[in-house]
Amino acid sequence: MVPLSYYVILSTVVFLIGVVGVLIRRNIIIILLSIELMLNAANINFVAFSHYLQNINGQVFVFFVLTVAAAEVVVGLAIIIALYRGKTTVYIENINLMKG
Amino acid sequence: MVIGLGDLFGRGFGPRAHWIAVPAVFGSLLFSLIAFGSVLSGGPHDLTLYTWAVSGTFQASIGIHVDALTAVMLLLVTIVSSLVHLYTVGYMHGDRGYARFFAYLGLFTFSMLMLVTAANLLQLYIFWEAVGLCSYLLIAHWYERPPAAAAATKAFVVNRVGDFGFALGIFLVFRLVGSLDYDKVFAELPKHAGETISIAGFDLPAVTLIALLLFMGAVGKSAQLPLHVWLPDAMEGPTPISALIHAATMVTAGVFMIARLIPIFNLSAAAMDVIATTGAVTALFAATIALTQNDIKRIVAYSTVSQLGYMVMACGLGASIGGIFHLLTHGAFKALLFLGCGSVIHAMAGEQDLRKMGGLKSRLPVTYVTFYIGALALAGIPPLAGFFSKDEILYRALLSGEVGIVFYGVGAVTSFLTAFYSFRLIYTVFHGPSRVDPKVAASLHESPSVMTIPLIVLAVLSVTVGWAGLPIPGLNGIAAILGPVLAPGETTEPVSGLLWLVMAGSVAVSLAGWMAARYFYLTRPELPKQWAARAAALYRLSLNKWYVDELYDRLFVRPTTRLADRLWRTVDVRTIDEAVNGVGGSTLAGARILRLLQSGQLQHYALVMMVGTFVILTVYLIVR
């Protein structure tokens, strides 16, 4: 058996990579990608615990999360395209109307 | 028996205001007459109206105490106030502040009546201040005129200097006696006669200190040297109030206070000497100034200062009966003279300079006759009132001790000067060729009867009031009434040869003054200018009031103004304004820093959120 801690560490690392990505990357689409990473890290966590606790609920929940994630990405991309139409930029540092 | 408590201090009713004020004050007059009769037959009355302050063993109440002294003062105040009210109806007709004038007149009369009926030092002081306030309000009646506003401020501030001493005196009395009621103070204070009070390392005799401090109040209120400077400038106010407050009533409050508190002053011979000397010096000093003034109201004002000096001197020499007697007669003829001036000013359409008058006797007959009577009374010509009261003072002065002759001498010289300037006034204003401006001369007319009736009444009083104090035993009503209050235990003396001598001397001096004035202003009118030119320095000294005002300006006014200016610039502008602006400035600076948080960069906000979350988690884990 693979120890649970390995899966949790993996999930944490992936999550942190996602967080750092949100905070550091300039391209909005990469940020969206990083958000997806965070989501999937949570999924890894779900599955790991589901296997560890021998309870199928975790894996069922992952289905729901993945579905919602997909819908969310659709909405996110739609917003980015609307933003691009107005500002012709994908770099987040240029979206600063709320400055000051 | 209750006296009608003076007037209401009503609000403006417009041009019909006199319908409230005049009946009210005449009602007070009626009550004063009743009170007078009651006191004569029955004795003093007391009535406590309102217990104001109770603190431990100290109790102060507002009430009425009427004895003989109070009763005669009540009569004086109500009679003169009633006549002035009547006179005002004519004099202030059409004035924009007509109703306000009557309101303040009523407030003043009320305050003065409460002052004289006080039974304790606290009530005395309260209404002492109140009459000072009314003086301020009334002098500045035409407040848009800068000289009037300045004169009112000067009057109040100078008065306040005296009141400062007065208050200190009252505090000391309380410290020694524990009460401010007259009867308790009179009974207890003699027991402290030898004590000293330690102040700033000096041991000062307590009772003398009290007497001197209380006298300071009288110096301010009754315009004695050195606090006399406000009275001549107070002539900026309308003439009716010059007659009421600055001749007959408010300024006499100082003399009244000395008489009322004579048991205190009697305990200190040193204080009495100071009082007598101050009075004598003031009398002479003011008379010398009155000789050269050209404004008719100022002449009468300096005359008032001089006569007040007589009264103060009398009280200081132990002749407070004489002082009060002179107060009463002076109230009559001085009010008459002021109202007469008002009549002249009214006829001359506001002109007050006697160099622009002359020959008015034919155009203003009633004014002329009554004014003449007033001048005769002031100069001390028998059988008018001024003679008897002034003579009483001179006689007592002579008898008052080793230096009595000095006081008599000062009094006699002042008498000569008084007669001189009184008739100088008469001859330059009413006699001789007319120097009146032609435009004004065309509208010269005698005053309406609301103004002339008070003049006539006062003229009658100026003649008759003196007869209440004839120095013949059995006929001396004044001594009979006031004696028990002011000089208990003294018996009336028989008429002595010295008295006739003094009377003859007084008449001679007064007549000499009169004849001198006649010579200088009627017979040889070119003489005054020649004499003025030859004694130019003295003339200038007199005309410029001995430069006292200029001295005070240099000593007090300018340094204070400079200090105030400096304080304003460093404290007010630099410190306080900087502090207030600084609050605004620092708020702006803080905001400028905080604004850096609002970068508009999404990732900055996300970073802050993450950091915050991790901090909370860490703290949570550690606490667990």
Image (cartoon, rainbow, N blue to C red):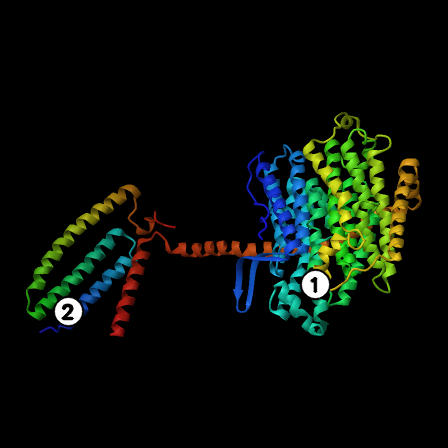
Q: Position of residue B519 (x, y in %)?
A: 92, 39
Q: Position of residue B192 (x, y in %)?
A: 68, 73
Is residue A17 in view? Answer: yes
Quadrant for the C terminus of chain B in the image: bottom left
Residues packed near mark 2 inside 10 Å, few (<14), some (14 to 19) or many (20 plus): some
Q: Which mark is residue B21?
A: none
For label 1, the residue is: B213
Residues packed near mark 1 inside 10 Å, few (<14), some (14 to 19) or many (20 plus): many
Task: Report which quarter residue B47 is drawn in.
Answer: bottom right
Cβ atoms at labels 1 and 2 below 8 Å apart = no
Chain letter for the residue marked with disc 1 in the picture = B
Q: Secondary structure at mark 2?
A: helix
On the picture, is B152 further left or further right than B545? left
Task: Report which quarter residue B501 is drawn in.
Answer: bottom right
As drawn, B275 above or below B444 = below
Which residue is more in the foreground, B477 or B90? B477
Q: What type is the residue that disc 1 sits on?
A: Leu
Is residue B225 in view? Answer: no
Work out which residue is located at the far top of the displayed protein and give it: B442
Which residue is more in the foreground, B600 or B460? B460
For label 2, the residue is: A7
Measuring 28% from the left and 56% from the top, which residue is drawn there? A25
Task: Report which quarter residue B138 is drawn in.
Answer: top right
Measuring 82% from the left and 40% from the top, which residue is drawn there? B425
